[in-house]
Image: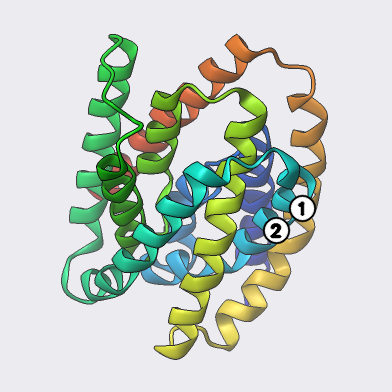
Amino acid sequence: MPLGDAVAISLLAFGAAFVGTISGFGFALLIVPPLSFVVGPKEAVVLSNALGVSWLATMFVRLRRDVEWGSALPLMVAAFCGMPFGLLVLEVVPGRVLQVVLGVNVLLAIFLLSKGVRINSQSRVFDGVAGFVSGVLNTSTSMNGPPIVLHLQNKGLAPGPFRATIAAFFVVSAIVTLTLYAASGRIGEYELKAAVLGLPGLGLGYLGGSFIVGRMNAGQFRKFVMAVLVASAIMALAGAFVG
């Protein structure tokens, strides 16, 4: 692998882990669009999951006592149902189309939340929809965060339970997704080498984010989460039209 690619992977892993550790999500949302220019769009999806599972596991172990399992488990079950469909989508739908759909829908949802629009988040129907869509997005784009983040934001979870529940959901999703990738032959020597090269940056990003997040109050945390969502939507749209 060229030295420039190795450095780029490590730097991108650092930035995504730093932001993701503060917000509790956002790793794939931030790393996939720029990583696509380094390793290719489909390789970026696989590599994002390979790197993300290490980061997520660390987050989950630290935050596991705050997990809202009543919210996490229904989302997990629905996501598992959506993942096989995501693999099919990855094969037949152009990546640019998926990025545009994702970016537009995230921006629309953010707008509605900012205007105070609320839905009955206690309904299992919405748990199922959010989880299923996240599962489809996970295996097709690796950017499965927005449906879950917006759903849990709408529930009004405090920062601690929010980050813990997100970590629990995503680490299980990532493990299942990697298993599906391996079974379908999508994880090769290149992806494994690239993942190893990204680990140092990943670790430094996690440490830096952990230092910052302990100094944020609930209001600052919510604004940061919304800012990450906006940035990720814009990056998805930019990647679709520029890539």
**Residue situated in front as seen by the camera: 182 or 11:** 182
Quarter of the rendering containing residue 116: top left
Marks 2 and 1, Cα distance to the nearest angstrom? 6 Å
- Residue 19: image location, x then y, percent: 62, 36
Q: Residue at x 30, y 50 (%)?
A: 128
Say what secondary structure mark 1 lies in: helix
Q: Residue at x 53, y 52 (%)?
A: 169
> Does residue 43 lie above or below 207 as drawn?
below
Number of residues whose C-alpha sits closer than 10 Å to that of mark 2, classed few (under 14), some (14–19) or many (20 or more): some
Number of residues whose C-alpha sits closer than 10 Å to that of mark 1, classed few (under 14), some (14–19) or many (20 or more): few
Residue that mark 1 sits on: 61
**Residue 48 in view (yes/no):** no
Quarter of the rendering containing residue 221: top right
Q: Residue at x 23, y 36 (%)?
A: 105
* Number of marks in picture: 2
- Residue 212: image location, x then y, percent: 77, 25
- Hey, what amino acid is under mark 2? Ala
Say what secondary structure mark 2 lies in: helix
Residue 57, numbered circle = 2
- Residue 102: image location, x then y, percent: 27, 44
